[in-house]
Amino acid sequence: MAATVSVSKGVFSFKKTNSKKRKDVCRVSTCDYWGEGEGKETEEHTYMNYVRCWQIVTNILDDLQDSIHAKVFQELIEFIRNAGKNNNMQSSSEMGGKFLKGQGDIPTACLVTGVNMPDHDAIFGSIVRLLVDGVTPHIAQLRSRDCSTIRVAVYKMISQLMGQNVVADPELADDIIDQPSIRRGQCNMAVLTSWYKGLRSETGHEKLPKLRGSPRKVVESPHKAKASPNKCRESPRKSRECSLKSGGPPRKKMKLREEPCLPRKGSHSPLVVILEDVESFPADVLRDLILICREYCCDLPIIFVFGIATTPAAVHQSLSQDALACVAMETFQAQPSTHYLNHIIEKVLMSEKVPFHIGNRPFKLLLDNFLYNDLSIKNFIKGFKLCMIEHFMGNSSTFLCCCKLERTSRIRAMTPSQLDVIRKLPSFRTYVESRPLKEQAALLLNEKVSKSTVLTLMTHLESWYARFCCLVKVANALTSTLPHSPLGRQVREVLTTCLSQPLAETEEFKDALKLLQLLARDELLPILTNVLDILQEESDVDEVLLEFYNKLAVILGRLKSLDQVDQVIDDSPLDEMPLNIQATDRFHLKEKLLELAKKKCKRPNIYESLRSEVLQIMVNEFEQHLQPPSKQPLHEIVFFDSSSTVKRHLVGMPRAAVTTALSNPHHYLQCECCHLDDPSSIITTLPDISVAYKLHLECGRLINLYDWLQAFISVVDPEEDTSNKKTIDKKLQARFVQAVSELQFLGFVKPTHRKTDHVARLTWGGC
């Protein structure tokens, strides 16, 4: 039986909710839903810390969004601006003479955005804002899910170009719905041409020639376009009636803003059509849209922007030869999402501006979800935000997770209950146990000493993490160019290792150290130069890094001053021991020679000694400072290291969720009628699908539908006696059929050809 054939069929309608009613509902503050803390003041401090941390992260992400794609956006905007000028100059020179339609190609920019589909909305949103600010207000943004036919695609394109540009002003969406929209009969290319010429005449770009005769010459019927399909054609009669009734271009009916949508003065305003996902568009719709726009490209400066997730070759494969001949494409490559992720890790997760940090397990979870699932920066940021919410809501000591100046005042104003929360932290207990007995008593009993110690530890933790992040970058710069990259080529891979265990004790670092000991001088000098550049940024505020920088700078100067790499440290020859070999046979002679070779020491040169000295200095720094955050006192305040709660929200487990929902509906519905004392029991008030599910668990591989129906009726309506009745209540039968149909949709049963009145059971492990 076909997979699309169901046991029953149904039609469902959903009434659209009125957006106006939502505005009247009183808003509830987010703070009202915040978790319970040790007190009202602590809860408010925790909530404000979360708000400020997320605001800092948002500001950093906004700057990164513009800077990451700044180059490709600048090239794309410049291409559209130049293409618009060329089109306007060409149309202005041909206005007075005769010319044939469809002679020019449509300028097309192919923006390769990558396969990270959830991030495309943000990319094209930035492009739209840049176009509105500096190029043109006439933008149409089309998506494949909204353009199933050419008629719908043309309507949406023209309606957006002629004033209903919801993309540029998404905040006006509610107001646009209430205002009269453009009629579909008015949305044709001839009306768009007349409307655009009117705008050009108003802004002084060109003067319209006086048209004589009927309005037929002003508003042409779109069915004259040879390449347009029959489905999108409109009769000339309807087109003339629309133009005569409206008296020209329908600008008054489409006025959606207080200011008119006019071209920029002193510049050309092309009509930009953005197709976000070209690969998902139906091939015939995309072809017809290109051919229709080609017929009017001499009158309308139309420019296409194709959003391509894979490669530009996908456009050539989906379009026909006549459509490809109508577009002049130029490719623009956006930065990959992995490049964007590296900047987010360096600017957000490894930044001292953000008081909140994540530990090894949640960071690895977010990283794996990004690399092996969707490559979406948007989802990665949502996961990071979820970690931040869980940290501030589930940890009462996060009232100290704030900026340095505010933290000092809060520590001094801590109440005894808040101080007890800090004292109960496991890392603080470990710190107290490591101190002498006299200090232990003062830390646990003296409030003043405890506050002073907490302030000192938090300051040390902040400076340690800044040093930790800098040394992670140093370790990445030191090992990223090695063969096979034992520690990985990206900073995120080194950070994952350092958050989980000491770097110097890992096998990967030991393998990298062996490779570093074999580097030549020409290979080591660029690595040390890169390391010094990284240290120079942080050495001004950290004395430890400054001392480390000075040591490496001195050794680097000595390496550069070497004239001969093979120059030995001591030119005086070593006293050679007299050879006294007395061997009876050749095997004995071989053993004597090997023993003498081991005793003879190799003379190191200056470069080898300097290389060993550099590596030893770095190993010492890594052993001392690249330790996991869990070894630092009070790390629980600023580090979130619980991945179980985040994994439950981010990583879906549909199998367990569906089984729990069907066997125990009370777990999700939280109603008393579905409460079960025994999970395996069946009661009358359970939902029909739960009753059918529990009954089907008692059957074998093949289930008799009639027996299943009899059992279902006996549970749902115990008073119904079906033993002496030839007909069954149609309502109960309909409920049973619906429940079985839902179980089939969920994959528990399927029809079978072995017996017509049976279904096969598909429950995992049951067959």
Image (cartoon, helix red, strand yellow):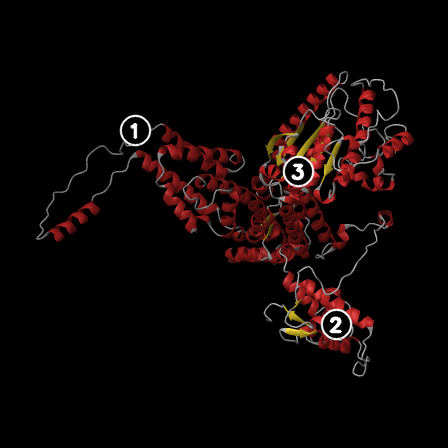
In this view, which residue lies farthest toward the right? 245
Find numbered disc 3 in the image and state the secondary structure of the residue it sits on: helix
Mark 2 or 1: in front is 2
Judging by the rendered image, the residue that carries numbered circle 1 is 564
Find numbered disc 2 in the image and state the secondary structure of the residue it sits on: loop
Report if the CB atoms under discs 1 and 3 are less than 8 Å apart: no
Of residues 489 and 41, which is closer to you in this image?
Answer: 489
Q: Position of residue 303 (x, y in %)?
A: 69, 29
Image point 59% across, 53% down: which residue? 636
Kind of residue sitting beneath label 2: His
Q: CA distance from mark 2 to mark 1?
A: 85 Å
Image point 84% across, 53% down: which residue? 15
Judging by the rendered image, the residue that carries numbered circle 2 is 675
* Mark drawn on residue 123: 3
Q: Position of residue 613 (x, y in %)?
A: 36, 39
Report if the CB atoms under discs 3 and 2 are less than 8 Å apart: no
Of pointers 3 and 2, the one earlier in the residue sequence? 3
Kind of residue sitting beneath label 3: Ile
Of residues 216 and 387, which is closer to you in this image?
Answer: 216
Q: Say few, some or many: other residues with alpha carbon within 10 Å of mark 3 (under 14 / 14 to 19 / 20 or more).
A: some
